[in-house]
Each structure stands twice: as structure tokens, then as C-alpha cells.
């Protein structure tokens, strides 16, 4: 597996584990609130092939309050 792929998979896995932890009773919300944004920001670009070639994050419906 390419190094970028490994980083992406590892970070997504950690975000998933953090989400599971956040749903447990007694989870430390301060920890979750501090770590979640750090993990999300550290996501590398997705490996090639994750999204279709014509994918654009700017396409899609307008958000409430936005005009096209």
C-alpha cells in the first residue's frame, strides 16, 4: 500500500474509533472535542480512485441560505 494510502486509512480508522468512543457513556467530551478536529485536519488527500474522476466537491445542491 502506498504511504499516502496508509496515512489516509489510518486517520479514517482513528476518526471512526473516536466516534465510537464519543458514543460511550462516560466519554470525555473535552478529549473528543480536542482530538476530532485535529484528526480531521490531518487527513491527507484521498488516495487515487476513492472518488470518481469527474468528482467535484463544489457540485451538489445549494446549502440553505446560499444562492446558485
Image (spheres, grey):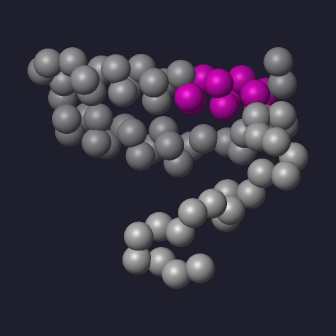
Q: Closer to the camera, 27 or 50?
A: 50
**Quadrant of the rendered structure where residue 24 is?**
top left
Q: Is residue 42 above or below residue 66?
A: above
Task: Please tell me whether the stretch drawn in magenta is mainly helix, strand or loop.
Answer: helix
**Quadrant of the rendered structure where residue 1 is?**
top right
Farthest residue to the bottom: give it: 67
Q: Closer to the camera, 51 or 8?
A: 51
Q: Which quarter of the figure is the C terminus placed in?
A: bottom right
Farthest residue to the right: give it: 53
Q: In the visual, does 6 lie left or right of 28?
A: right
Count the marks: how many? 0
**Quadrant of the rendered structure where residue 36 is?**
top left
Whether the magenta-drawn stretch holds residue 10 is answered as yes
Q: Position of residue 9 (x, y in %)?
A: 65, 24
Q: Position of residue 61 (x, y in %)?
A: 57, 63
Q: Position of residue 64 (x, y in %)?
A: 41, 70
The span picked out in magenta is 3-12
Q: Residue at x 84, y 25 (%)?
A: 2
Q: Residue at x 67, y 42 (%)?
A: 44
Q: In the visual, does 25 lie left or right of 64?
A: left
Q: Residue at x 36, y 27 (%)?
A: 19
Q: Residue at x 84, y 37 (%)?
A: 48
Whether the magenta-drawn stretch holds residue 9 is answered as yes
Q: Closer to the camera, 56 or 5?
A: 56
Amino acid at each position: 500500500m502506498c504511504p499516502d494510502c496508509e496515512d489516509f486509512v489510518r486517520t479514517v480508522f482513528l476518526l471512526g474509533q473516536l466516534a465510537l468512543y464519543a458514543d460511550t457513556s462516560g466519554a470525555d467530551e473535552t478529549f473528543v472535542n480536542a482530538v476530532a478536529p485535529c484528526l480531521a485536519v490531518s487527513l491527507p488527500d484521498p488516495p487515487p480512485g476513492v472518488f470518481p474522476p469527474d468528482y467535484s466537491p463544489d457540485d451538489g445542491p445549494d446549502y440553505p441560505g446560499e444562492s446558485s
